[in-house]
Structures are given as C-alpha cells and as structure tokens.
Image: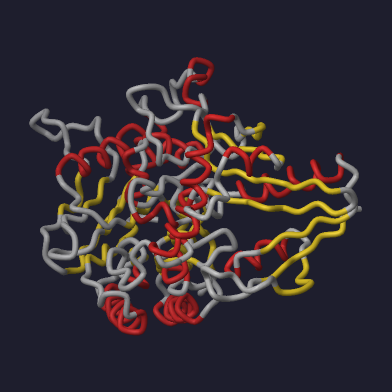
Amino acid sequence: MEMIKVALLQLLAAGNDQESNLLKGDKACRDAAGLGADLALFPEMWNIGYYEWGDAGDDANALAAQAITVDGDFVGHFRSLAFELDMAIAITFLEEWPTGPRNSLALIDRHGSVILRYAKVHTCDFGDEALLTPGREFPVAELDAKSGRVRVGAMICFDLLFPEAARALMLEGAELILVPNASRNDQNHRICLRARSVENMAAVAQTNYAAPQQGGHSVAFDAVSYAWDEDGATVDPTIVQADAEEAIHIAEFDLPRIRAFREAETQGDAYRKPGTYASLLRPEARQPFRRTDARRASAHNHLSIRPAAGGELDRLRDIAADGKRFWGYDPDLVERWVALGDFTPEVFAAKDVFVAVAGEEIIAWSSLILNGDLCWLDDLWVAPRWIRHGVGRRLFDHAVRRAKAAGATAMEWEAEPLAVGFYEKMGGRHVRDSEPSPIWNRTIPVMALTLG
C-alpha cells in the first residue's frame, strides 16, 4: 500500500427525509469514487440528518420509529453501492436496537460486506441523546481497501473528547480512526482530535455536516508529529482542513510513512505504564464532575437495590410522574393521577417498596403487595433517562425473587401498553384487561407470571 484515500463527505442533509438522504448519499459516494477514494465517510447519523429529528423531539417512540436496522434497505443500498464502486463506505444511521435506538456506524468494505459495527459510547446524555442506547465497546477491523489493507476503528463526535476512546482503538491495533461528527467543530474540538491522533500515532479522518446545519471544518491528521522538514521545522500532521461549505474533501494517508513512524516513535503503547492507571476504572465521578443526568458505563454493574426509606416518597412520586409524561400522557391528567392519593405514607406502608440506586441517586422503584399465593406488582417505574438500560429488568427480577421468598406462586400486574413488549420478554402473559380507569378513560392489560 502506498496511499489510502478517504473521502470526507461534508454534506447538508435533507432533514430527516431518509429517501432524500439516501439519494444524496448515493451521489456523494459516486463523486468520491470518481475522485479515486478508497473509502467514503459520512457525517454522524446520516439517515436522519442527526439534529433534524423532526417531530421526535424528546418523544422516545417517535424517535424509535425513525430507527433502521443494519440489514435493512437503507444500509443495504450502500452495501450494493460499495460493491458497484469497488469502494468502502462508512455509513452512519440511527439504529434500531432492543433497548432503544443507537447512534451507529457500519463500515462496508468494497465487496459489500459489513466488516465493522460501532455504536457511539459517549452519548450526549445532557441532551436528546439520553434517549439512545450507548455502545459498550470500541471494535477494530481490517479493511481490504483497493490500495491495500489497513486496520480501522471508529468513534463518533462526543467520543473525541474522551482520550480513552481513541486509546482503546489504538490498543486494539487501529491505524486509521474514522470520526463521523455533528457539531460546531470549533478550534478546541479540532485540537482535541489532533491530540488523539498524535498521542496514539493513528491516522484520523473526521467528517462533519456543512454549515449552516453544523460547523463544517472537517479535518484529517496523519499522526506524523515528530518529523522535521529540511529547514528543521516540525511537520504539521494536518492533511485536510476544510472550510465550512458543502464539499467532498480527499484525505490521502501515506500508510508506509505512518507505519514506520509508529514503529520508531514514543507515543501509542510504547512507553505506557498500565499499572498506574487504576483511577481510570473508578466507577463513580467525584466532584466537581458529578452530573445527575450522566449514565456512566459502569452504573448498571454498580446498581444497588434496597428498601425505600420514609423520606424518599417525593422522589418516587416524581419518577412515576416523569414516567407517565415520558410515555406521552397528557400532563394535566398526570397531575390529576398524582393527586389521587396513591403516593401517601399510608399507602406505601401497606406495600413492599424497593428503590434502585446508581451512585447516590434513586433512579427507579417498585412496590409489591404480598397476599398469599398471589403477589401483585403494584409499581415499577424507571426514571426516563435510565429507560432501556437494564434497570427495569433488574427491578423486575428482584420483585420476582421477593415474591417467591414470600411464598407466592404467581405474580400479576397492570402493564402500561407501551411496556407490554418488555414484560413479555420477562415471561409475562396477558390474562385479562383491567377495569376502566376514571382518569385515563380506558382499560389496560393485566399480565401474569407463574413463579416456578
């Protein structure tokens, strides 16, 4: 391999019109192939234009309706196109996933095969991405490009602000890191991306949306930082610095030069001291970095379940009300429901109430009414930003164990219609409908589970 050419497709999306984005992406790939590209890289979540989520907003169901599968028609089109053009394509999309959509990339080789799938690990949990399921790993794959073979990994937008992301890719052997982006991409972000390239001695290619949708200024770095020209000046590792306008930019990476640099220089994994980095694996954030909306990757593993305390009633009521609003209930009806009196110390004293805690925050709760052979699961509520992260499953399993320990042989509960699928996965079955609700003016499924 002499050079590998990566096309940075700095485009404007057609909102969340997936058909239009497919057609525009098709043309951009054909143009990139005409420029001799080995690989075409899209900006973040191309199928829906990232920020153009349309009517979805913070509605999880509307957003999920826009998600697609990796084996569906949209990605399938680019698989066929990659084969036709003899060019690899890194396509980005909102991916359908059992626990909620993911912000994903699929790397398609020139033969039309998906050789790498990556889901954004560092989701922007302070915003709408709190509705997404974060990825849990940084995979690397060997790409058979027209110009030769290269080991490729990916990280997406916000990932670039976390040195661990690029470091993990380097440790897995990545020589080229692809970075789809959707941001202002200001100078500070570009400096961080340059640092990721230099400190890992890995080539980096970033594609951002053009202005005015985002800030453009897509960049590429070849990582050769400790090199000097004939006048003794340090060579700049920047090989592409785009402006803000819509355009396709070709980043040419000299792989033999980069590989020789990696074999000779001091960064990357050459002189690391892994035994001194224990604090990197500490699960909880310390002040001043604690954020109530953060979903740390280890939080699920460090989730604890304990009996509720008397002073926690307000928090439990708020979680339940937020859950109703999350599923699209009328806010005025939610307020009426809260005021009915189910959230009083007297009502709670008659139930077996447990809370799920991540760090110091109560993020979910459940309540059981134990009554001989039949146990009634009266509540199971998860704070919206923790929905689809395994918390409900942990609480449900805990409730089953409590019911069994109390001698129950069956458990029943009323299920929110949108949660029926979850309960079916937990083994529940629909046994009847509830009595009509005076507030919601409808019946809902009653489900049951035999406790073996």
Q: x, y (%) of residue 59?
A: 40, 65
Vertical relation: 338 (above or below) 267: below
Residue nearest the viewer, comparing 180 with 129: 129
Count of labels in the image: 0
Q: Is residue 114 among the parts visible in the rendering?
A: yes
Image coordinates of residue 369 in percent, x first then y, are 75, 47
Query: What is the quadrant of the N terminus in the image?
Result: bottom left
Q: Nearer the viewer, residue 247 or 315?
A: 315
Residue 188 place in picture, x, y as percent = 18, 39
Observer-nearest of 243 and 123:
123
For image coordinates 70% across by 41% down, the residue present is 350
Where, by quadrant of the figure, is residue 356 drawn? top right
Q: Residue at x 42, y 57 (%)?
A: 335
Which residue corresponds to the image point at 25% horizontal and 50% vertical from the top-left?
220
Camera-side residue of 277 and 424:
424
Does 11 sit above or below residue 148?
below
Q: How has the structure been colored for display?
A: secondary structure
* Quadrant hosting residue 160: top left
Side of 237 where 159 appears, left or right? right
Residue at (72% x, 60% y) in the render: 413
- Could you tell whether 288 is left or right of 167 in the image? left
Image coordinates for residue 154, horizontal then vertical, percent: 42, 52
In this rendering, position of residue 234 left or right of residue 401? left
